[in-house]
Amino acid sequence: MRKSVLIFILLTTGAAAAQERSDTLAGASVSSTFGSILVPQRIDSGELKTTAGLSEAIRRFSGVQLRDYGGVGGLKTINVRSLGSEHTGIFIDGIQVDNAQNMQVDLGRFGLDGIRSVSLFSGQKVSVLQSAKEYSSANALYLDSGEPVFVGGNDNFRLGLRFGSFGTFSPSMSWEHKFRTGESLRLTAELVSSGGSYRFRVSDFRRFEDGTVEGYDTTMIRRNCDLGSIRVEGLLFSRPESSSQWNLHLYFYDSERGLPGPVFKRVDVYPLSEDRQSDRNASLQARWSRRLSDRWSLMWRTKVSRDFLEYSDFPELRPELDPARFRYTNVNGYVSAAALVRFSDRLRLNMAQDFQYNRLDANLASFAYPERLSSWSAVSGMMSFGGLDASLTLLYQKIHDSSRNGASDRDAVMPSLVMKYNLRDNLTVSGFAKRSYRMPTFNDIYYTTAGAKSLKPEDAVQFDLGVGWTPCNSSGPHFAFKADVYHNRLRNKIIAVPTSNQFRWSMYNLGEVRVLGADFISSFEKTVGRDRLGASGRYTFQQSRDFTSPGSVTYRGQIPYIPIHSGSFNLFNEYRGWRADLTVFAMSERWNTSANLPPYRMSPWVTLDAAASKTFDVGGNDLSVRLTLNNILNRQYEIVDNYPMPGLNALVRVEYSF
Amino acid sequence: MKKIALLAFSIAAAAIAVSCTKDETTSRDADLAGVNVAVGEEKGTFSKLFVLNEGNFLKNNSTLDFLRFSDGNYVSDAFGSMNPTVPQGLGDTGNDLALRDGKLWLLMNGSSTVHILDAEDETLIASVAIPDPRYVAFDDTYAYVSSYAGAVFGGEAAKGKVFRINRKTYKTEGSVETGCQPEGVAVAGNKLYVANSGGYNTVHDDFVSVVDLDSFAVTESRTVASNLHFLTSSSNGDVWISSYGESTWTQDAEGGWIQSMSEPMGLYRLSGGVSSRVDGVHVSCMTLCGDVIYAVGNDEELTGGYALSLYKVSTISGKVSKTAFSGTDAASVGNPYGILVNPENEDIYIADASYTGPGSVKCFDKNLKLKWSAVAGMIPGHMVLY
C-alpha cells in the first residue's frame, strides 16, 4: 500500500530539574513550555546546533520512535511510547500543527532557525495559560521560537549553507531587526535542493541444517528521492507594556519530491516508482497575552492554515500514459481563549476554550468533502503544598463532522491527574494518569475506496511513575538521573479490516494494545581545565503487546516497529571553542507485524554518528563551521520495512552571523 | 491508489485443480523441515499441496509453502529455501499459481514477473517479464497471462492485455488487447475466454473477451455482468464467471456513511454464447473439481450481514446446493481467499487470510469437519495439488 501516503494525504539533561515556574508574564518572555509541573525532555538551542535537524534531535529523546522512511525527502514522523504518531501533537509556540487528513505531521517541514528549545511531554503538560487543545494529545512535542536577542545593535544577520551527501545543497538566511517602537522581527528563509539518490544493500542469508550458508547480497541504488523545497517564515514579537505581549508567525513551505516507495523485487525493465508529491503549506498564527491583575491573566491564540498536497501516481510500466493526479486541500481555522486565575501561591485555576474548523477538498470522484467543527473545553486546577505539586484537569472535546453523505457527532471527556513531590531538594517523585482520545481522521472516515463506518474515538489511557535525582551542587560536576515506568493501554484502536466483500476494506474500532515501558536517562558533565566533558545515556524498554485477536498468531505479539530495547549514548568534549560529539543509537529486533515469527523479523541495528564544530571570530563576527558524519560504520538498516536507510553520509554547515 | 485498488483486487483466485499424478521420487526439498500439522493425513497420488501467499502489497513478502502429504509437514517459504541465492526471493504479490506438466507458474503482480518452477523441488527454471500479471491458462503450446498492462487507478483509461508465453522457450510471443483490467482466463476448445473487470474505471467493464487461439485475436465480446473476476471452463465447454459485485454508499442510523453491496459477487454461466446468472451463489473464491464448482461466499452480502456458506454448483445441471459454515468447523474461517478441492477424497482446502497477521490453510473433509490447519504466510490465496 505504498499509496497509503496518498490519502492524506536533548537530551533532556534537564531531567528532574527544579520546577520551572513562571506565573508572571513580566520579565522573560513566556515560553509555551515553561511552568509545567512535569518537566519535559528538552533540547536547548546550544545542543540543537550540534544536531543535523529536527528529526535528528528527536532521536535523542527517550521513549520515542522516529519513523523515518529514509533519505532527505523521506517522511519522518514521531511515535511516543507506542501510542502511534496520531497521538503525538506537534505544537509550535503552543499552537498545534494539524493534519486533519491523517494526523501525521512530517517533521522534515520544520527548520531549527531561531528555535530556542524542543521539548517532549510524554504525558500531560500542565502549565499556565495553556490552551484546551494542549491538554488533548496523549503526548506533545513543542517547538519554541525564541525572541531575538540584540547585542549592541538593532540588526542581526545570519547566512548559512549546508551541503554534502546526496547532492544536498541548502542555503539559508535570517534577519532579525528591532524596531524603534520596541517590536522585533525575525525573517528566515531556507532552500533545500537534494538529488537524494544513495546506494543500499539488500541481502539475505539462510543457514541450512547441514551447516551451509547460502544467500545473496546485492547493491542497489535508491532512486526518485530528490527533493526541492523552500521555507519562509516571518515572526513578529511585541511587548507593548510589561503586562502584555503578542506575536505573529507566518509560515510558508513549498516542496516537490520524488516518492521512491518501498523496495521490492521488480524486473529490471521497469523502475520501482516514479511517483511524485507536491506540498504547499501556509499558515498564520498569533498569540496575545495580558496580565489583568495579580489574580487574572488571559491568553488568546488563533491560527489559519491551508495545506495543499498533490500526489501523482505514474504508470511506471507504461510511461506513455498520463499519471493519476490526486489533489487534496485542507483548510483550517483555529481560535482559543485561556484564562488563569491565581487564588494564591498555592492554588491556581486555568480555563480554556478552543474552537477549530477543518475542511478537506479533493479532486476524487465521489469524494465526501468532509468538514469538521471541533470544540475543546478545559478546566485545570494547579495546587502547591509544601513539596507537593498537583493538578487535576478535565477536558471535554466535541466534534461535528458533516459531508456530502451526512453528518455525525462524537464527544469525549478526558481527565488527567499529575502529581509531583519533592522528597529533597534534589530528589523528586512524579506521576500522572491520563485518558485521551484520538478522533478518527478524515482518512479513517472518508476514505473513498476503503469504506467507512461510524467510528468511536481511539481511547488511550496512560499511567506513569517517575523519579528524578540531581545530586550535585551548582559549582561541581553536573549529574542528573531520571527513571520512569509506565503503562499505556490503547483501546478501540482504529484499524482497516476487509469486509465481507473482501476487496473493500472498512475501518473498525478493533485494536487493543497494552504497553509496559520504562525510560532511563542520565547525564554527566564536568569541567577539567579548559575541557568540558559530557556524557549522557538513554535507555528505553517497551513491551507493546497486541491484544486485538485472541487465539490468533498475533495475540500478545509485540506490535510492529516497536523495539523492546532501544537507547543511545552521547559523548562530547568542548575545548577552546571546539566541540566534538559522538553519538551511538541502538535498537533491538522488531517485527513488521504483530506475528512475531521469523519471516517478519527486522534486524537490530547500531549506528554511530559524529560531529565536530568550531566557531571562529572573524572581525568581531561569528563564523561557525560544523561537520556531521552520520552512520560512520556504514551499516545497512531499516526503520520502516523495505525503506532502506542511507549508509555513511556527511553534511557540512557553515554559518556567518553579523 | 492503484495499490489500494490492487490490494482490493489481488485478493483471491480459484486455483484450478489440475488432476495430474506423478510418480514418487525423492526431491531435494524432502530435507526441508516443517511444522507437522496433518498427523495421519493419508497420502493419495498427490505428494504436495502448494500454497502461494500473496504477501502484502509492495512488501515483497510473497512466499510459496507446501504441505507434504507423506509426513504431514507444512513447509513455509519453500522457494526461499530452495533458491536462496535469488535476490529478493519470489518478489511481490503473487496473484496466481498454476501447475502444468510438472511446472509451477507463479504470477507476481507487483514484481511484474512470471516465475516458472520445477514442481518437484521448487527450483527456479525461468522468469518472464510481464507487466501486472493476473491469471494464467494454458494450451499445448502456450501459457496465456492476463495483464493490467500498466494501468493506474484514477489515471488514463487503458486497455489490458493477454500475453502469450511459449511453454518451451519461455519467451513472450505477442499480446492481444482485451477490456480494462482483465482477470480470470480459461481455454475452452480453440478459444481463450477473458473476464474483464474495468475496476480502475468509474464505470466497470461487463464483458468477457473471446480470443481465437489460431489467429490470437479477439473475435467476440460477450456481455455477462459488471466487474468480472474469476473465470473457469467446465468439461462441457461452458464458461463460468464470477463478479466482484457492485457497491453503493448509504447512510447508517447515526448518519455516518457505509459502503454496501448493490450487486452480489455472483456467478454467471456462459453457454452457447448466452449468459445467465446462477441464482443464490456468492463468490469470494471458487474452484472447479470434476463437474462441480465449489465456491465460498457471504450469503448475506446484500443485507450487510456476514454468513459464509459453501456452494456446490453442478456444471452439468446448474443445480446449486448450499451448506452454511455456521454450526460446522468451517465457522472458524474468517476471510476465505482461496479454495481448492482434492478430487480423490473431496477434502476442501480453504486459504483463510487474516488482516492482522499471517493467514492459515485449513483442510476440511466433505462434511466440513476440520482435518488440519496450518499457519501460512501473508494472505494465502492460491493453491494447487501436485
Image (tube, rainbow, N blue to C red):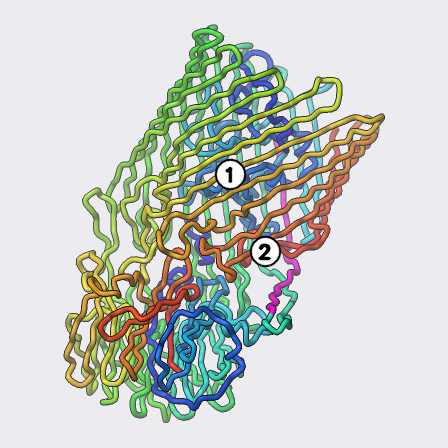
**Quadrant housing residue B94:** bottom left
From this viewpoint, is residue B150 visible? Answer: no
Horizontally, is B269 left or right of A333 in the view? left
Residue B362 colored magenta? no
Q: Main secondary structure of the magenta part?
A: strand
- The residue at which mark 1 appears reads as A517
Q: CA distance from mark 2 to mark 1?
A: 21 Å
Front: mark 2 or 1: 1
The quarter of the picture where the N terminus of chain A appears is: bottom left
Helix, strand or loop under label 2: loop
Q: Is residue A645 above or below residue A107?
A: below
Residue drawn at x 43%, y 85% is B164
Instruction: Determine crowd level at label 1: few under 14, some 14-19, many 20+ residues with C-alpha closer than 10 A.
Output: many
**Quadrant housing residue B339:** bottom left
From the top left corner, tell me how far across and down residue A599 is, in percent. Answer: 51, 62
Give the amino acid at mark 1. Gly
Horizontally, is A217 left or right of B59 in the view? right
Give the amino acid at mark 2. Ser
| Residues drawn in magenta | A185-207
Helix, strand or loop under label 1: strand
Q: Is residue A589 above or below residue A583?
A: below
Residue A204 colored magenta? yes
From the top left corner, tell me how far across and down residue A380 is, in percent. Answer: 40, 19
The disc numbered 1 marks a residue on which chain? Answer: A
Labels 2 & 1 near each other (Cβ < 8 A):
no
Looking at the image, tell me whether mark 2 or mark 1 is earlier in sequence order.
1
The disc numbered 2 marks a residue on which chain? Answer: A
- The residue at which mark 2 appears reads as A603
Residue drawn at x 46%, y 48% is A309
Instruction: Determine crowd level at label 2: few under 14, some 14-19, many 20+ residues with C-alpha closer than 10 A.
Output: few
From the top left corner, tell me how far across and down residue A113 is, in percent. Answer: 63, 33
From the top left corner, tell me how far across and down residue B5 is, in percent. Answer: 37, 62
